[in-house]
Image (cartoon, grey):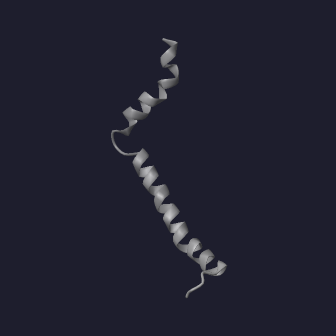
Amino acid sequence: MNDITYEMARHFSDTWGLLFLFLVFVAVIVWVMRPGAGKKYDRNAEIPFAEDE
């Protein structure tokens, strides 16, 4: 039976965890900057002012 030690978990998170979080960050940036998303964000930006009319 393989026991997972602190050092093994730390090494795994230092390498693959960093890569995973970097890829998630890039995916979020690509999702936000995709073509056509600006209209949706412009509509959402006006929501706080909708009751002022």
Q: Is residue 38 found left or right of 47 in the rendered image?
A: left
Q: Residue at x 45, y 30 (%)?
A: 44
Q: Residue at x 33, y 39 (%)?
A: 36
Residue 34: % across, % down: 37, 45
Quadrant of residue 3 in the image? bottom right
Residue 21: % across, % down: 52, 62
Q: Residue at x 47, y 24 (%)?
A: 46
The residue furthest top is: 53
The residue furthest left is: 36
Q: Quick one: quadrant of the N terminus?
A: bottom right
Against 46, residue 37 (above or below) is: below
Q: Nearer the viewer, residue 42 or 50?
A: 50
The residue furthest right is: 6
Quadrant of residue 15 in the image? bottom right
Against 11, residue 23 (above or below) is: above
Residue 29: % across, % down: 45, 50
